[in-house]
Image: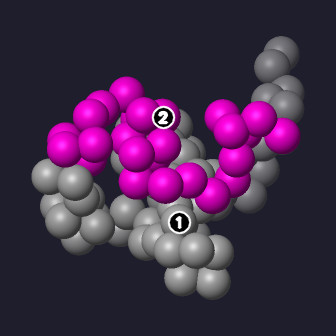
Amino acid sequence: MSKSDSLFVTDAECARRLGISLDQFKTALPAVVKEGFPLKDPLFGDLWYWPAVRTWLDRRYHLQPPDGVTAPPGLDEQEPWK
């Protein structure tokens, strides 16, 4: 597994994957944590779990529904157009 495929990442790697500097990441961190940004995992070397960060970003930008939200029944069924 290459470093870019790692599931757990350092502050610097998280910032790099976000496309911002480490200083920008550290400055933004207190605000985004208040919005539900995932926390570092102490069981895995106090690193960020990248898939959780990615999911949080996808929800923030409305690419995934918020937690606990599901489609109404039948919404995923094919519409019987006539």
Crowding near the residue tagged with mark 2, few <14, some 14–19, many ≥20 C-alpha atoms within 10 Å = some
The residue indicated by pointer 1 is: 47
Measuring 81% from the left and 20% from the top, which residue is drawn there? Answer: 81
Q: Mark 1 belongs to which amino acid?
A: Leu
Crowding near the residue tagged with mark 1, few <14, some 14–19, many ≥20 C-alpha atoms within 10 Å = some
**Quarter of the figure that contains the N terminus:** top right
Magenta-drawn stretch contains 15? yes
Q: Mark 2 belongs to which amino acid?
A: Arg
Magenta-drawn stretch contains 17? yes
Q: Is 3 placed above or below 47 here?
A: above
| Of 11 and 28, the residue lying toward us | 11
Which mark is drawn over residue 17? 2
Is residue 62 shown to the viewer in this render? no
| Of 80 and 63, the residue lying toward us | 63
Measuring 77% from the left and 50% from the top, which residue is drawn there? Answer: 74
SS at mark 1?
Answer: loop
Q: Relative to residue 76, is residue 69 drawn left or right?
A: left
- Residue that lies at the very extreme toward the top in this rendered image: 82
Residue 30: x and y in percent read 18, 65
How many marks the image carries: the answer is: 2
SS at mark 2?
Answer: helix
